[in-house]
Image (cartoon, rainbow, N blue to C red):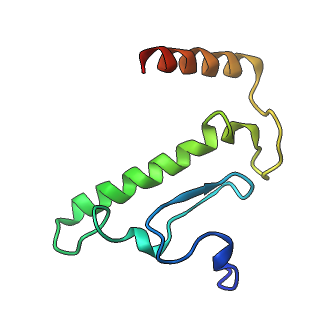
Amino acid sequence: VNKTNWKTYAEAAVTNAFYNRITNSIQLPAGILQGIFFDAERPMYLNYGAIGFIIGHEITHGFDDAGRKFDIDGNMRDWWDRKTNLNFLKRAICMIKQY
């Protein structure tokens, strides 16, 4: 952890989470540990479930239509093979039609 570049990612009080395509990382500022996402009076399994949902959501950005265009080193590169691309597009079209 580089404690000198915290402003690069987010203010500590922000109640949001972020995926960074360049660094292939997620950021959860301390501000997210409040309200509907965390409450010390609530059963811990609900807190874990809420934060786990947020973490899972942010991770999926690494594989969405924008995130999939970046490789493990943050370089913009189409690293999916043709078959994977076609399967992704097929499923994306299905979701678009459904919703």
Q: Is residue 1 visible?
A: no
11 with respect to 85 (left or right): left
In which quarter of the view is residue 3 placed?
bottom right
Q: Nearer the viewer, residue 64 or 1?
A: 64
Q: Nearer the viewer, residue 77 or 12?
A: 12
User: Which residue: 76% across, 43% down?
Assistant: 70
Count of labels in the image:
0
The percent coordinates of residue 68 (x first, y second) are 69, 37
The percent coordinates of residue 25 (x first, y second) are 63, 58
4 with respect to 91 (left or right): right
User: Which residue: 50% across, 60% down?
Assistant: 17
Residue 90 against residue 77 in the figure, above or below: above
User: Which residue: 54% across, 48% down?
Assistant: 59
The percent coordinates of residue 9 (x first, y second) are 63, 69
27 with respect to 21 (left or right): left
Residue found at the very far bottom of the displayed protein: 4
Q: Is residue 61 visible?
A: yes
Residue 34 against residue 92 in the figure, above or below: below
Residue 45 against residue 14 in the figure, above or below: above
Q: Quadrant of the N terminus?
A: bottom right
Q: Quadrant of the C terminus?
A: top left
The percent coordinates of residue 82 (x first, y second) are 76, 18
User: Which residue: 32% across, 71% down?
Assistant: 34
Residue 3 against residue 77 in the figure, above or below: below
In which quarter of the view is residue 8 placed?
bottom right
